[in-house]
Amino acid sequence: MSVRELVVLGTASQVPTRHRNHNGYLLRWDGQGILFDPGEGTQRQMLRAGVAAHDLHRICVTHFHGDHSLGLAGVIQRINLDRVPHPITAHYPASGQRFFDRLRYATAYRETVELAQEPVRGPGGTLAVCGAYTLSAQRLSHPVESYGYRLVEPDGRRMLPDRLAAHGVAGPLVGTLQREGTVHVAGRTVALEEVSEVRRGQRFAFVMDTRLCDSVYALAEGCDQLVIESTFLDEDAALAHEHGHLTAGAAARVAADAGVRQLVLTHFSQRYSEPAEFARQARAAGFDGDLVVAHDLLRVPVPRRGGPAAAGG
């Protein structure tokens, strides 16, 4: 059975605390692992969360502030130490190439793994297309160049038993119809569209340090799971805007307006000690879907298609 879940490795913003590590998030998606924003300490958090270097297939860095990237050095060296048998692709802002290079070669080690570098440029765009998803990026609004990432599963078809029965399609013919698009039954041709409906692919977005901008809404649009920073509480909205961040209420309003099913708030300033206040402000802002205030080592399943969103915490 395919697994689609978010593994939260760290939830602090600039300053880690006794209970919150720097950022780090692994998205498991049908046998592939995408590591987002590995901050300092990510390698150890992976160990605590049961995430192995072999689980990684892509690394996506939103920007080159330390809490989102200082863990790259250790993660890359661990990938090579463990001789991961498949290639790994790294995406990051092209303007930060010098930072990526410094982190990749921070100390001496033996390179044993193919690490492809595919930086993001300009406004962003499509980064990768594979059978399980299309990965894209969009430029955000932060003091340094920053990108959000969006993963979209291709749409599929859901077979409708009553229509199959009405057209006399049963047994092996169902599989033939799914593979070939048509079958012949009792002297007539039955098309796939006659006995099925579109099953919308699942959608995931990862939005870190940014002010409100059009790209935040575009990334969040129709997501089943939105992982988004809420560095500040609403009473500090002016401070949030000054430093290029969102508040809990702003993130929740984006999610509500964009039709998000599950909202995962994270990247919390060390100035706040009560996580429940982030949830309260998100609800007050009008988000009534599945709400998760992330904590380190939490696992959050991506909500199942067409059903109620799974509770994540």
Image: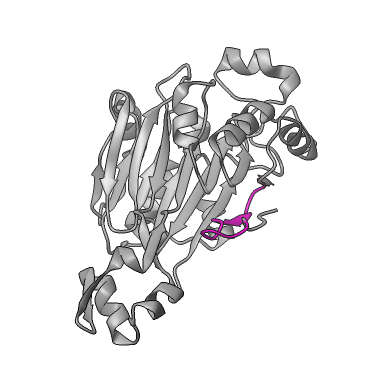
Whether residue 108 is situated above or below residue 297 in the rendered picture: above
Residue depicted at 70% across the width and 30% down the height: 270
Image location of residue 208, percent across then percent down: 51, 32
Q: Is residue 61 left or right of residue 175?
A: right
Please state the total of marks drawn on the protein image.
Answer: 0
Quick one: 17 or 61, which is closer to the camera? Answer: 61
Image location of residue 194, percent across then percent down: 33, 66
Residue depicted at 45% across the width and 48% down the height: 203
Residue depicted at 25% across the width and 39% down the height: 118
Image location of residue 257, percent across then percent down: 58, 32
Whether residue 1 is situated above or below residue 58 in the rendered picture: below
Q: Residue 279: name its quadrant.
A: top right
Q: Which colour style is shown? A: one colour
Residue depicted at 29% across the width and 47% down the height: 89
Q: Quadrant of the N terminus?
A: bottom left
Find the magenta span and give its range: 293-308
Quick one: 37 or 21, which is closer to the camera? Answer: 37
On the question of residue 41 being in view, the answer is: no
Whether residue 57 is situated above or below residue 62 in the rendered picture: below
Q: Is residue 244 magenta?
A: no
Q: Is residue 191 left or right of residue 156?
A: left
Q: Main secondary structure of the magenta part?
A: loop
On the question of residue 17 being in view, the answer is: yes
Q: Is residue 301 magenta?
A: yes
Q: Residue 121: name its quadrant.
A: top left
